[in-house]
Image (cartoon, coloured by chain):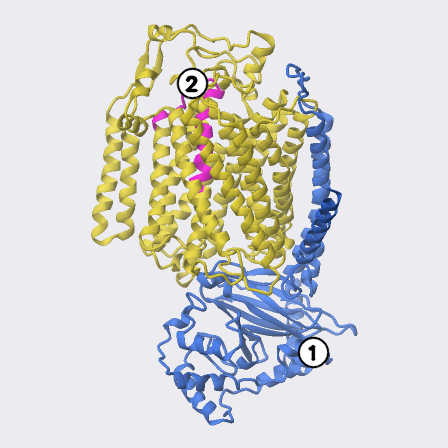
Amino acid sequence: MKGWMTRFKAVMALTVMALILSGCGEPFLSTLQPRGEGAAMLLELIILSTVIMLFVFVVVMAIYIYVVIKFRQKEGQEDFIPKQTEGSHALETLWTVIPIILLLILAVPTVQYTFTFADVNNPEVSQEGEELDQIWIDVTGKQYWWHFEYEGLDITTSQEIYIPTDRRVYLSMISDDVIHSFWVPSIQGKMDVNPTGNRNEMWLQADEEGVYWGKCAELCGPSHSLMDFKVIAVSPGEFEEWVEDMQGVTGEEEPETTTAQAGQETFEENCLSCHAVGSSPNKVGPNLTNFADRDKLAGVFDMTEENLFEWIDTKGEEMKPGNLMVDAPYDLNEEEINQVIEYLMTLSPSEVTPESADNGVYIDSDLSDLFPEEEEEDAEESEEDEETDENDEE
Amino acid sequence: MSTTAEKKAGFGSVLWDYLTTVDHKKIAILYLVAGLFFFILGGLQAMLIRIQLIAPDNEFISAQFYNEVLTMHGTTMIFLAAMPLIFALMNAVLPLQIGARDVAFPFINSLGFWLFFFGGIFLNISWFAGGAPDVGWTAYAPLSLFSESHGVDYYSIGLQITGFGTLMGGINFIVTVVNMRAPGMTYMRMPLFTWTSFIASVLILFAFPALTVGLFLLTFDRLFGGNFFDPEMGGNVIIWEHLFWIFGHPEVYILILPAFGVFSEIIPTFSKKRLFGYSSMVFATILIAFLGFMVWAHHMFTVGLGPIANSIFAVATMAIAVPTGIKIFNWLFTMWGGSIRLTSPMVMALGFIPTFTIGGMTGVMLASAAADFQYHDTYFVVAHFHYVIVGGTVLGIFAGIIYWWPKMFGTMLNEKLNHWFFWLFFIGFHLTFFFQHFLGLMGMPRRYWKFLPDQGLDLFNLISTIGAFGMAIGTIIFLINVVMTQMKGEKVSGDPWDARTLEWAIPSPPPFYNFKQEPLVRGLDALWVEKMQGNGKIQPAEPLGDIHMPNRSFVPFVISLGLFIAGFGVMYQGAMWILAAIGFGTTAGAMLYRSVKDDIGYHVHKEELEEEGDGSNG
């Protein structure tokens, strides 16, 4: 009997351990393992509210257990009539006032943080006291993929955004169809992406280099659960390199092999009306500038030629149910598809890829080379602002 | 009309009896049967969801079908299971608790049920007509505008019809409580279940019109080229969210307040003590209802309303925790010093307290607007609202059904099976939903058809599915219990639980006129007062006299059927407009018939009542 108990205890202990270990999730996805300023602040708030609430729970359960054990009807006392208490003003005041105090303790940081997260107009300052250039990215949510345009940098990309780890990156978000919600759990909380014309703004900041999973968090159709994207946080120097490489892409670069060249031709005839290579306002379908560097195909599938073949062949009908590419009018044979695949696999303009986020290389930069003009504009604008302010005062 | 004649009646006449009844006790049974049917249907849908999510990358059901199932699970459980089951309890108990012979408008009561029922059937026909709604029970525009099948039309028209019924039911109970209380039954002597039902009815009165308006706009957008929510045409999608949640948040309190009331009856009865802090319980109920209208935007923290709106709604939401906390402590202190009997309703009440406390705790956590950026639309929210709605409302409904079963049917559900039901359901429930808190925090959004492998989400999803089977088995045991109990048909006394309130002073089931003589209420817990200070019987407030009763009527059924038929015409249009003409014509004709025909009811004469002997008030 004793041996059984020990073994039972061991099993229980192991189970509990397993639950605790798996209770935190994966670092690239879990809110409980924050890798950025936003998620870290939010985890603080989550922990604060959990602690307050657990305190309440413990009090309730202590009274509860005492009452249930102590005041069970005793045998032979079935006729016992307890005292019919009406209530107690002192007690009732107590359990009104204490919760109010506890809630105030939670309400203050809640309001504070709510305002911090909404603040996108306050430029960050570097350690040397200089204003950092703000990187703004226009985000467009579409059934079932994400489109990104880097303001002022002349870069467009889809499904994966690169951000530097040294500063906040600001997002201005809108949807082209239904409501989506932009969420990168391990670095920032979510924000809805509305179609109405009111852009939502938020910021992202990653402390560590890494590939972070983003999710759509608002039901948007059959493939809602497959509308994943990635945030690739790299060191500022790598980011600068990536930006420059991306800026160099025109879409007319000729690939080396003849199959790929044939593929490019097929691509231009059949795909280019929706998909762009290089910076382009075309966002009918995902931008493919750095397609070969993608971590995942269509956000969720492994980047294999089989998957890619199936996608082009079936237009993703089974892979992402309800996706809009099924309406594309093209009709390619096996050879043509393979040529297109070979061409697509050459679309790797930069050395900086998702692997750069994991290779431990850190290159420093203040990114000021990327914003030569904007700085002046900013300066002009702020001067103008001051002038108008003065005018207002007058 | 004597009861013996009814017993011998064949199936046809029983059916006719129920189709035409205006008796609140029979309408309660109709609500109970229909509600349980839809509860099982919604439960099966839940099982499909959990089986789909048993393993990563599962292909058990298709993405489209999954969205239909999740939409119908939510819609069915809220509108077609929880609401009618609450109405079942309110109908069965509320008039008896205040010493009334029926509700204020028996005809409207019947109409309310049939509207609900036809609306529910209408909604479910979508399964066989090209696909159920697939946009979530919240039907956010513009996804609900883009949805291609007629599913969302079935949703908007079906819920519209059901909503009319609910609104009528709510108004009926408000008037009943205000006007029909027996002599001595002052407001502050009303049992807590009556109080919470009364307040929930007030919430219905103010909340449902917002849904009605929203559904009309949605219907116009989809069927008649309206552009209220179409951003391309200058519409605004956020308005739908506001309208929906201005209804949707009070709806949560419509569901939970009557459950609070049920437990506020059960706990005193089985602790043999009066409710601790009765007046603060009443005050807390009113405060919850009042605040419940000021917090809808906490469902919309991530919409981008801005930090000022978010902060105000966050603090208002947190404030609701105070009156709710008052209730929890009052229940605990009702038991304190009492003599607790662990009957199955009481055990369910004891299961409810910690479960609901956890649901309330996560509620406060969700109220923290910034932190909600992480919780919102994840499994954390799914876990939270199931802790509140299953741990609160559903446990409350089942506890209420078991507690008042003898009053409704004159028989007693098998206690042993009740306990089995509770423990399987309760443990299954916690297995299912406790781990979903962590799934949400680990990055799993809700309404996900698939989750991917290697994201650390496998184990908890598996546990969750296992738990769901526990809940299913528990529910099956309950149903077996119901069937077995009714087959045996062992009759029990009018007061099998040794309870405290007025409904236990009359036989089980009560005669169709409820009280032979109007009862005289001499205090809170009227029957308990008589047990302690009198002879254990409620004193009559009037001499024996004729009782005025309403006539049965088939008109409510016809009115509802007309709207049901018209719904198809409005939806399919074209040649089908003829259906709309027939349907609206039927409804209008039935209403006209009702208006011009004087129906003054009938009297049960004094002599008949005397013959039936002393079944009167005890």
Residue at image position (32%, 54%) is B223
Name the element at disc 2.
loop
Chain in blue colour: A
| B211 with respect to B575 (left or right) | right
Frontmost residue, B300 versus A332: A332
The amino acid at mark 1 is: Asn
Q: Circle 2 is placed at which residue position? A: B510
Q: Mark 1 points at which residue?
A: A359
Is residue B595 something one can see in this rendering? yes
Residue A316 lies, in percent from the top left, at: 43, 71
Over which residues does the magenta segment extend?
B79-107
Task: Give x and y (percent) for residue B301.
Answer: 58, 53
Chain of the residue that carries numbered disc 2 in the rendered image: B
* Amino acid type shown at disc 2: Pro
> In this orientation, which residue lies closer to the viewer: A385 or B523?
B523
Q: Do labels 2 and 1 share a chain?
A: no
Q: Would you identify the image quadrant in which residue A240 lies?
A: bottom right
Which chain's residue wears label 1? A
Gap between marks 2 and 1, in whole Å?
78 Å
Q: Colour of chain B?
A: yellow
Q: Which of B208 and B2 is in front in this view?
A: B2
Q: Which residue is depicted at the point 75% across and 72% down?
A: A126
